[in-house]
Image (cartoon, grey):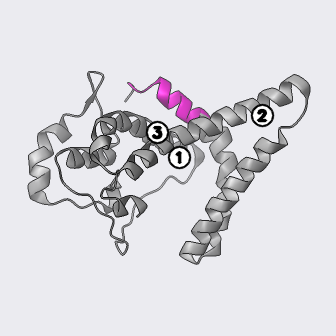
Amino acid sequence: AAQARFGAVMCCCGPCAMYRRSALALLLDQYETQFFRGKPSDFGEDRHLTILMLKAGFRTEYVPDAIAATVVPDSLGPYLRQQLRWARSTFRDTFLALRLLPELDRYLTLDVVGQNLGPLLLALSSLAALAQFVIDGSVAWWTVLTIAAMTMVRCSVAAFRARDMRFLGFSLHTPINIFLLLPLKAYALCTLSNS
């Protein structure tokens, strides 16, 4: 929703994306022959198609009252495989989007760069805290408190905006993010050419 206010949604999610047929027909060949480093790419098609639409000069918009159903992983293994695909897709298509970003609003550039740098900075902070604990046995309280505060602020804003206190529960995702998803994103970055 925030991206739409600045002129472009950077990823129209698969289950709830709709495209004008005439626009899709113009880009179908590029879409169907998606390659990365000379190899066919067979995932992340929603993000890729969104970038193709934006590069062709089309607008992408957010529709707040759209409703869609989708299938989600119900156990850890499939969830991690989904997150690995999404991480690879995000990294790959960010490279494509970098050439497009100067034509778009500065906020979108900041948002896309932040989506990629944010996890990196969180990973570096977590590694620094872990190193401090291993080296001298002390806990990096400022790092822990900063991560906890940022998590609670983000979840509180979401709960307030949505008027739904359940969003506070999303703060439990932070340990999952630090201990499972950040290592997975590092692996995704090192294996971008894999399908």
Q: CA distance from mark 1 to mark 3?
A: 12 Å
Residue 79 marker: 1
- Residue 184 among those drawn in magenta: yes
* Vertical placement of residue 60 versus 76, above or below: below
User: Start and end of the magenta stretch?
Assistant: 183-193
Amino acid tagged 1: Tyr
Find residue 125 and report its horizontal and vertical position in percent.
69, 36
Element under label 3?
helix
Residue 51 is drawn in which quadrant? top left
Q: Name the residue located 84 percent from the left edge and 43 percent from the top edge.
A: 141
- In the picture of the structure, the residue carrying the numbered disc 3 is 87
Please report the residue visible at 36 percent of the width from the left and 75 percent of the height from the top: 65
Answer left or right for 33 relative to 111: left
Number of marks in the rendered image: 3
Residue 5, above or below 56: below
150 or 83, which lies in front? Answer: 150
Q: What label sits on residue 129 in the rendered view? A: 2
Asked if 136 appears above or below 72 in the picture, the reply is above
- Looking at the picture, which amino acid does disc 3 mark? Ala
Of the two numbered discs 1 and 3 on the same chain, state the one appearing first in sequence: 1
Residue at 62%, 60% in the rendered image: 154
Q: Nearer the viewer, mark 1 or mark 3?
A: 3
> Is residue 67 found left or right of 18 in the rendered image?
right
Dot 2 or dot 3: first in sequence order is: 3
By secondary structure, the bulk of the magenta-drawn segment is best described as helix
- Quarter occupied by the N terminus: bottom left
Marks 1,2: beta carbons within 8 A: no
Q: Nearer the viewer, residue 138 or 86?
A: 138
Please, which residue is most extreme toward the bottom here? 163
How far across and down, in percent of the image, does residue 66 sit? 34, 72
Disc 2 and disc 3: Cα gap in Å? 24 Å
